[in-house]
Image (spheres, grey):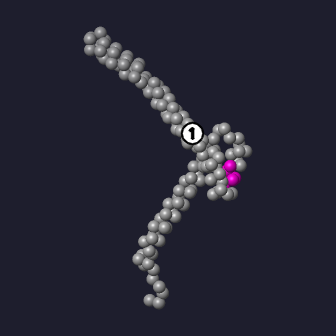
Amino acid sequence: MNGSMNLAYDYPLLGAFWTMLWIFLWILWFVLLFRIIVDIFRDDSMSGWGKAGWLVFVIILPFLGVFVYLIARGKGMGRREVDQARAQQQAFDAYIRDTARGSGGAGGVDELAKLSEIKARGDLTDDEFRRAKEKILH
């Protein structure tokens, strides 16, 4: 063979560590960049022109734009993220409450238990129990 063959052991271990570090930093940079872009759109207190200005600044001069954004508005990023998480949790809780209430919920279970007790005492016939149960479930 006249050409040189590159083998894995031709790449030094320190070079592999540096490559992994640069890949990690590159991924970290993109995560930070996208989090800032999401935060720009999430902020309801900023006007449309303000959002457009920050977005252009972050896209045209990404390193400077990201660092200036973090210095100027970084403190509010965490607060806005927590507010959004709380709002999502409250919406989810409200959805669960409405869904449970709509399908009979705990009230339907209580009514069925009382109905079963009445039937067990012998105050209801099987046909009356079946009709009352259908009425509760539907």
Toward which corner of the image does residue 81 lie, by quadrant?
Answer: top right
Is any atom of residue 134 visible in this view? no
Residue appearing at x 55%, y 36% in the figure: 83
What segment is highlighted magenta in the picture? 54-59
- Position in image of residue 22 (x %, y %): 52, 64
Residue at the limit of the structure toward the bottom, as seen here: 2
Residue appearing at x 37%, y 22% in the figure: 109
Near mark 1 (Cα within 10 A), the count class, few <14, some 14-19 or many ≥20, is few
100 left or right of 49 in image: left
Location of residue 2 with respect to 12 vertically, above or below: below
Along the line of sight, which residue is nearer the eye, 125 or 106?
106
Find out whether residue 80 is within the magenta segment.
Answer: no
* SS at badge 1: helix
- Position in image of residue 138 (x %, y %): 43, 23
67 left or right of 112 in image: right
Location of residue 3 with respect to 67 vertically, above or below: below
Q: Amino acid at mark 1?
A: Arg
Is any atom of residue 67 visible in this view? yes
- Position in image of residue 47 (x %, y %): 70, 41
Residue tagged by mark 1?
Answer: 79
**Main structural element of the magenta stretch: helix, strand or loop?**
helix
- Position in image of residue 113 (x %, y %): 33, 18
Toward which corner of the image does residue 130 lie, by quadrant?
Answer: top left
Residue appearing at x 50%, y 60% in the figure: 24
Image quadrant holding the N terminus, namely bottom left
